Image: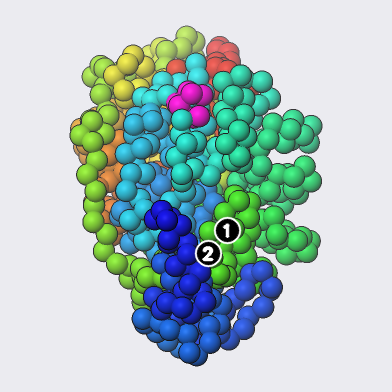
Amino acid sequence: MNEATQSFKNELRAAAGEIPVDLILENIQIVNVYSNEILPGSLAIYNGKIVVLNPLPSHPAKEHFDGKGMFAVPGFIDTHIHIETTLLTPEALAEAITPWGTTSLFVDAMEIANVAGKEGLLALIKGTDALPFRVYLEIPSRVPTAPGLETTGGVLDAEEVRQLFQLEQTISLGELDPSKILEYREEYLEKVLAAQAARRICNGHAIGLNAQELNIYATGRLSDDHEPVTFEELLDRMRVGIVTLIREGSSERNVDRLMQGVVDNQLATENLMFCTDDKHVNDIFREGHISYNVQRAIDLRLEPLDAIKMATINAAKHFHLEHEIGSLTPGRFADVVLLKDLRKIKPEIVFKGGKIVSENGKSLPVSMKEYPDHLFNTVQLKDPITPERFQIAANGERARCKVIALIKDQIINDEIQAWLKIEDGFLAPDLENDILKMAVVERYGKNGNVSTALVRGFGLKSGAIASSVSHDHHNIVVVGTNDADMACAVNAVAEMQGGFAACSNGEKVAELGLPLAGLMSVLPAREVMAKMDQVNAAARALGSPLAAPFMTLSFVSLPTVPKLGLTDLGLVDVLSHKLTDLILETE
């Protein structure tokens, strides 16, 4: 008998009481997401799995644990997260998320793949089975996101995607933006077919689509979308069979508006689930993780059991993982969250595989793993960055220009037009009307490109802020009130081999180093949180009213989120998927 068969046989024997189970978690109120019941009982756990629901008092067990009458709910699932944008390594992330009851992450590692390709992705997920949460892989589909419109450090072609589907922990093809389907781009269609051949679903990114386009997108095998920002958008997707992952990140605040629509319209919730997508470490510590989404849904009058199902069994079923996670039933992993109150989502104790990983708001320590040296050397500026690199030449006295206009609490933006002065042959920002320069600097040492555009909504009155986290190309992005401080901030980021920086009067005033691929810190979570608070405070001192200025900065350059994006090659008209002119006319 081989090892797998013997292990399986022992699980059955443990369920039958022929051999002792490892643990009986007793005196709990079990929240059953299949029967929609909450009943007193106990769980018998063997080899990390639940093997008996309500075992007999005589059932042999090595250990008993008194749940003190608390509610037992399945561990929470984040259905779509980019670990890199928490700014933490997976090991450091444990301290932030396990106390909030998250026991499974569905990870689209597109950020590190865009920087360092397949090798970077594999380095990120290596050894994650030892973490106090489970990591399932959504294979990045967009590496690069906008071929021909940006410079990236890495590429994942269709053959590499097919190879990655051989990994046991893969569950889907990661988010695929509309242009790849609507323009019939063969490389991406091959990736979709690779997912289908591997019997995996395909995640969507259906931003900005009308009803007819949604039909085409759904025909393209895209199963879900985390981009709806209105209830009407959510409903449009549901009607064509595209389920919604309701997102709450640092700069994408969607839960309240969407859940209010769900409750007000009495929409059934079995095809709804939660994700964070992109959430900084400080927001996780203060608000919660998926627990926050569940809590807000309950606060907005959704029944607690429905909110919990959105964070557990709904997600497991959608990704075809209900045989492993999502419920407290026999045969599933013993990932359990104990709560004193179902209306107050504040975990007291969290189990992963029947072992305590967090208690009283504190997680168990996790050892840092080694990462390849080359991942700490990914920022290579081809040419020195001087203030002159951000000048925009123009003739005449003034120019009518396209401007990226931020939309509060969203990653989408609007396109507006504004007349700006031309001074000494160069376009001048308009600080009074909050129209600032924004630039992207190529950071892989491939071409030295610098492109500059205009943005409204950052609110800076002085200085500049810069980041090497800029979706999805992750070149250095900077916004500022003057060219000298913009150059200062970019150079500060380069000197750290990636990170966030704020400059004023030609001097650096705050920084957070992210040297691992220019995306993540190797410091513990609380240290990163403290430094994140410092750079956010510096941005506010320079005048920005934004709650998450660096998260906003990281998205405003994205060339797949309407209406405008900025890459090292220039200003991108997202809906037409092509470069567009910044200056429309001069006089």
Q: Which residue is mark 1?
A: 323
Q: Along the horizontal axis of the image, is 309 left or right of 232? A: left
Residue 401 drawn at (x, y percent)? 55, 21
The region drawn magenta spans 156-162
| Mark found first going from the N terminus, 1 or 2 | 1
Who's the residue at 26% across and 64% down the image? 365
Residue 226 drawn at (x, y percent)? 60, 46
Q: Main secondary structure of the magenta part?
A: helix
Magenta-span inclusion, residue 404? no
Identify the disc placed on residue 332: 2
Question: Of all residues shown, which one is farthest toward the front?
Answer: 1
| Amino acid type indicated by mark 2 | Arg
Who's the residue at 23% across and 31% down the image? 374
Residue 71 drawn at (x, y percent)? 53, 80
For disc 2, the neighbor class at 10 Å (few under 14, some 14 to 19, many from 20) is: many
Q: Is residue 434 visible?
A: no
Question: Which image quadrant is residue 265 in?
Answer: bottom right
Who's the residue at 47% across and 53% down the image? 105
For disc 1, the neighbor class at 10 Å (few under 14, some 14 to 19, many from 20) is: some
For the residue pair 430 and 336, the one nearer the viewer reads as 336
Q: Along the horizontal axis of the image, is 246 left or right of 47? A: right
Query: Across the whole image, how many numbered discs are drawn on residues?
Result: 2
Q: Is residue 580 visible?
A: yes
Circle 1/circle 2 CB separation < 8 Å? yes
Task: Decide: is 332 above or below 414.
Answer: below
